[in-house]
Amino acid sequence: MNQKNNLTFSILIPAHNEEKMISSCVDSCLSQTRKPDEIIVINDGSTDKTAEILRSYGSQITVISIDKATGNKSKAQEIGVKYVTTDILIATDGDTILDKDFVKHIEEEFEADRETVVVMGYVQSTRHNTLTALREIDYTIGQDLYKRAQQYLNFILVIPGCAGAFKTELFRNGAITFDHDTLTEDLDFSYKINELCLPVKFNHKAKVYTQDPPTLHSYINQMRRWYGGGWQNLKKHYPIIINNPKAGLILSTTYLEGLVLSSLIIIT
């Protein structure tokens, strides 16, 4: 049991046709050294064995089933947030594995400074081949170099959708709302948080392991979605660039690095 003054934590997992990975994801949440107070899975209209797998966990998790797929992760999250009863909401994906100390390190960050409203973790690739190994290099550069610099400048560009923790009151009081008009909901969230000048912490010890595209075709599709969503959000939130020179610097270097590295991976 948590002491009266301790923060409480939920893990929210949207899942659509995740039969290959959902067990590993849920097991990693259940195996935390600091147990989450609740685990909520949104079964977003899955047509594979996801629902059957989730039922096997019984009362260990809360499953919210949506009969027809929403087609948008942010819609599934919006539904899921309504069921969260704790102080902190940890958002992850159905194909992501949390390190056993993930919740522990997230809790330490929030407890160290109660003014913190968002904590983001460190994303690593579950390597399969040369392509995903190259993606791991991209993650390393983006986090060990860029994320640390962005935290210093108090403008973290992207809070990853598979490794973000938020004070639930952000959603309860309407400070952050769910829009469904971009391809990259995590980037949309990040812009909103930066526009509100909310304090964000980056904890490199809080690790998650994500599944990256193993083929060139799937990699290109993912990059098309990321960059498409990137431009959508840039158009949507462009005033922050005009009003914040640090944002312009961070965005220009990030987009340039991403274009160069993606081109090199495709050429290779």
Image (tube, rainbow, N blue to C red):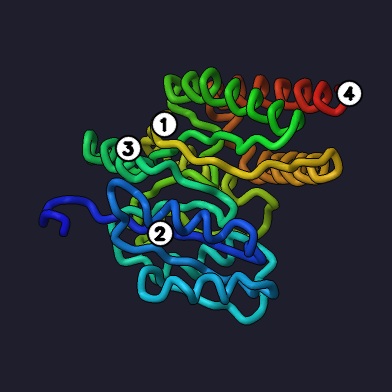
Identify residue type, mark 3. His
Image position of 72 with respect to 202: above or below: below
- Residue marked by disc 2: 171
Measured in 3D between alpha carbons, the distance from the residue under mark 4 to the one under mark 1, in whole angstroms, is 32 Å
Amino acid type, residue under disc 4 in the picture: Ile
Residue at image mark 4 = 267
Q: Position of residue 171 (x, y in %)?
A: 40, 59
Q: Looking at the rendering, which quadrant does residue 82 occupy? A: bottom left
* Residue 202's disc number: 1
User: Where on the picture, by quarter, is residue 109?
Assistant: top left
Tag 2 near tag 4, CB within 8 Å = no
Q: Secondary structure at mark 4?
A: helix
Q: Secondary structure at mark 3?
A: helix
Give the quarter of the figure containing the C terminus.
Answer: top right
* Residue 264 in view, yes or no: yes
Residue 254 lies left or right of residue 28; in this view the side is right
* Kind of residue at badge 1: Phe
- Residue 105 is marked as 3
Q: Position of residue 61 (x, y in %)?
A: 40, 69
